[in-house]
């Protein structure tokens, strides 16, 4: 059903080629899972940045209040 | 060229209900620019926020001077980043434009942006490389983020590791050119900018950023967002 008209591949070739698309799909699926899993595991958590931000926020509020900002 | 004396940075801040965060963002920006000695201006484009954002912005203008803080209001039914940027750029006098969110989620030292600016046309913040990262994200959110980014990388091959972050630095002419060509809305628009930039041969540099979860207010990620992201991604895939 898949063979172009007039082209007859010997049976062994056909047997090997038929599952190829499925095989590639599965292989890609495994690659995707592995890659996303790895990236998920190595996703940085920025503790110091968050702490620093809190400090900045306090400093900012104080400074702005002094300059006359009415929150 | 790396940033030097003649350069001026215009920061575009589109706002909607950012009354709490706006003063803090402005304060941080002013401080960072002054410390690095860079000439700057901050353009606040408010979409008719009902919470008094514009009033706070005007107070900031009085405090820092109207050459440094420029406040504009646009009232539109379809507010999108694109509309805000077009509007903001009309008033920008700098030769570099910085685009960022006003919600304090991008806590980054602009000094490092300046350094990274080794003749790049665009500098983009990335959460995924170097010591970039996030704070306050649960596993599910991280998974969605990494998964979406993976699909994006496979489909678009954009040449940048983080497409949906909205902290960017552009040369003014580059931004103008890209704005003409981009048609999407929302944050798909951000993605389209990078893809088109690559097509046009612009150089893109990356800087790690720490994405700290919204300090005030709720995060905008929901089921709807995911669907529209996928739709936008497929559109970009088909049309670029």
Image: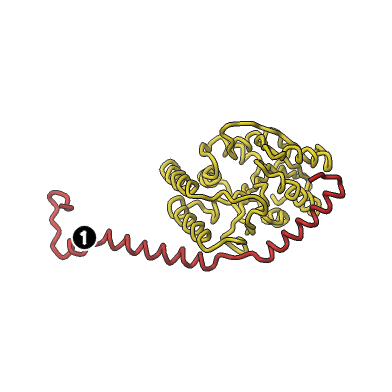
Q: Is residue B137 above or below residue B175?
A: below
Q: Is residue B134 above or below residue B79?
A: below
The shade of chain A is: red
Q: Which chain carries label 1?
A: A
Q: Nearer the viewer, residue B58 or B64?
A: B58
**Which image quadrant for residue A8?**
bottom left
| Residue under numbered circle 1 | A18
Looking at the picture, how far across and down is residue B2, in whole percent? 70, 51
Secondary structure under the numbered disc 1 in the rendered image: loop
Chain shown yellow: that is B
For the image, the number of numbered tags is 1
Whether residue B127 sits left or right of residue A22 in the image: it is right
Looking at the picture, how far across and down is residue B49, in whole percent? 67, 37
Q: In this view, does A63 lie above or below B172?
A: below
Whether residue A20 sits left or right of residue B152 in the image: it is left
Rendered residue at 73%/44% (across/down): B9
Rendered residue at 75%/43% (across/down): B8
């Amino acid at each position: 059903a898949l063979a172009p008209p007039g082209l007859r591949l010997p049976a062994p070739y056909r047997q090997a080629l038929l599952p190829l698309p499925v095989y590639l799909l599965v292989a890609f699926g495994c690659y995707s899972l592995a890659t996303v899993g790895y990236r998920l595991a190595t996703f940085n958590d920025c503790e110091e940045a968050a702490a620093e931000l809190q400090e900045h926020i306090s400093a900012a509020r104080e400074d702005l209040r002094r300059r006359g900002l009415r929150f | 060229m790396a940033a030097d004396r003649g350069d001026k940075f215009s920061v575009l801040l589109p706002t909607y209900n950012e009354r709490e965060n706006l003063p803090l963002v402005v304060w941080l920006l002013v401080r960072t620019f002054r410390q690095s000695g860079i000439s700057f201006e901050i353009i606040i484009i408010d979409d008719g926020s009902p919470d008094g954002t514009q009033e706070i912005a005007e107070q900031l203008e009085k405090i820092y001077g109207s050459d440094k803080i420029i406040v504009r209001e646009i009232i539109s039914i379809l507010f999108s980043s694109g509309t805000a940027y077009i509007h903001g750029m009309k008033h920008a006098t700098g030769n570099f434009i910085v685009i960022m969110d006003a919600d304090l989620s991008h806590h980054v030292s602009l000094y490092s942006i300046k350094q990274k600016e080794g003749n790049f046309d665009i500098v983009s913040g990335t959460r995924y490389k170097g010591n970039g990262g996030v704070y306050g994200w649960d596993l599910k959110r991280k998974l969605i983020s990494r998964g979406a980014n993976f699909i994006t990388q496979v489909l678009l091959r954009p040449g940048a590791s983080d497409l949906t972050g909205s902290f960017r630095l552009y040369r003014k002419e580059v931004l103008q050119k890209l704005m003409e060509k981009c048609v999407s809305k929302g944050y798909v628009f951000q993605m389209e900018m990078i893809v088109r930039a690559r097509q046009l041969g612009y150089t893109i540099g990356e800087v790690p950023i720490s994405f700290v979860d919204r300090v005030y207010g709720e995060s905008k990620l929901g089921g709807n967002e995911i669907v529209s992201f996928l739709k936008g991604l497929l559109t970009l895939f088909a049309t670029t």
